[in-house]
Amino acid sequence: MIDTTQEKLIDSLDNAIEALRYKSKNNLYSYTEKINSIDSVALYASAEMYKGTRMFWTSPDNQLVLIGFGSTSMLHAEQNRFNEIDRQWNDLIEKAIIDNSYQLPGTGPILMGGFSFDETEESDLWKNFQSNKMVIPEFLVTTYKGVSYLTYNVLINEESSPEKIAHYLQEQKAHFLGSKNHSSVSSNRLIEAEDVLGDKWKNTIVKATKQIELGSLDKVVLARELKVKFGEIISIPNVLNNLLEQQKNSYVFAMESEDDCFIGATPERLVKVEANELLSTCLAGTAPRGETMAEDEVIGQKLLEDEKNLQEHAFVVDMIKMAVEACCDEIEVPTSPVLLPLKNLQHLYTPVRATLKKEYSLLEVVKRLHPTPAMGGVPREKALQFIREDEDLERGWYSAPIGWMDASGNGEFAVAIRSGLVKANEASLFAGCGIVKDSSPEKEYQETEIKFQPMLAALGG
Ligand SMILES: C=C(O[C@H]1C=CC=C(C(=O)O)[C@@H]1O)C(=O)O
Ligand SMILES: [Mg+2]
């Protein structure tokens, strides 16, 4: 029997296919409907048959949850990646037929995905996460301010059959919305943790501080890897549940590609655009949390006054301010940082607000901002060169932009730190530190130890 939602979908498809007579082949068709509220991680688990394409995203305020799966189109650029993806997306959207009566952020056709830290890096570890991968999910479940919506994205042409497409989409929907498959096995058993080249990393810090002293570099962010192995295949829904529970004030994300999953909980926004409002974040400078409230306050106060951390932070503020000034009006940047407390550590934090000029897109801003000195360094090219030559690490998508954008130019990218690449029962975790003149190798090492904690705890290690 054909129910009313299916009838509506068939009608909408009928109109879309009719409109194609005058358009080119294989156009994107997108249809959005309201659905009952869902448990986002349970839905992610239910979409098991789409393993390898699933994507998960929540903003720190939990106002927006995006779960995408299936891949209707994958945009990829060989070079000039941010502008090229923008161009391909605009082309696609210009011809697309969009039936979305809600017009809320994160509904309708969207692109989800990310970029690698360094476009020129070649990596075997990251073979499934190349320089750029932005996907239009076939199914997108958006929960915006507690209300859920389902968007179907399909390619259609003049010969498409509305009945067949509608039938297929609704069948899939019944599958993933109806399924009770919510995996909640007990936590994973950590059986091995290998600090990859830890001592060498400390020597690299000495080398960096020497270069800084000589004046050829001001700041460079250096990262290291911790390889962990578990007794069983790591359950991504379990890790998501743990991250959501344990890491408040963070973007929780997961991107699957083939057999691998890049997952994490990052506190760092790169840029958000909604209408013409732009928000960015300067986050750099770190201290642990205290055991008691009193101790926590003392540590926080010390961080706010610590010369070395303030310097680390100031490089980021100066650069982001300059990048934003080039494409925005009405820029607001407070003159001194405040504390951003997280479960395992606290950061120096300066929010940035501005009005984005009409001629600039979200990805154009991403291009200008990435990598900020919270991930790369100052001067940018010199720092990148140091990282390429001395870091001994395949960064892949770690410390790079990850996020989403919609057809109206809205969207958000975070910086993918506090993250790990999961492969079956193993994971590579990454953590880095801003190295400045007064950095001590031992202290920076301790800082990375704390930065590994969120992912270790979420994995069950
Ligand atoms: C590069 C990382 O953190 C950056 C973000 C905030 C604070 C940082 C710091 O204090 O060193 C780092 O610049 C990481 O967590 O892997
Ligand atoms: Mg630091």
Image: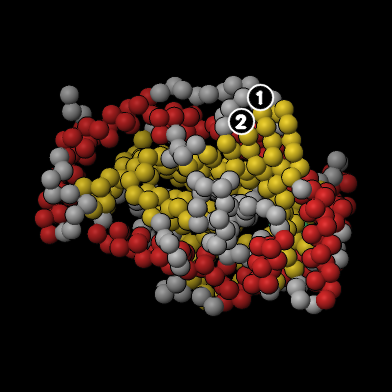
Cβ atoms under marks 1 and 2 closer than 8 Å: yes
Q: As displayed, is residue 445 above or below residue 10? A: below
Observer-nearest of 445 and 408 = 445
The residue shown at (19%, 54%) is 25
How far apart marks 1 and 2 lie (CA) works out to: 7 Å
Ligand 1 within 8 Å of the CB at mark 1:
no
Circle 2: element type: loop
Residue 347 image position (x, y, % from top left): 74, 55
Horizontal side of 25 relative to 203 (left or right) equals left
- Sequence-first disc among 1 and 2: 1
Question: Residue 309: x and y, percent?
Answer: 80, 63
Q: Determine the image quadrant of residue 385.
A: bottom right
Coordinates of residue 188 in the picture (x, y in percent): 66, 26
Pick whichever, 260 or 242, lies toward us: 260
Residue corresponding to mark 2 = 425
Q: Amino acid at mark 1?
A: Gly
Q: Residues within 10 Å of mark 2 (few under 14, many from 20)?
A: some
Q: Looking at the picture, which amino acid does disc 2 mark?
A: Asn
Residue that badge 1 annotates: 231
Question: Measured along the vertical axis of the image, is residue 29 above or below residue 305?
Answer: above
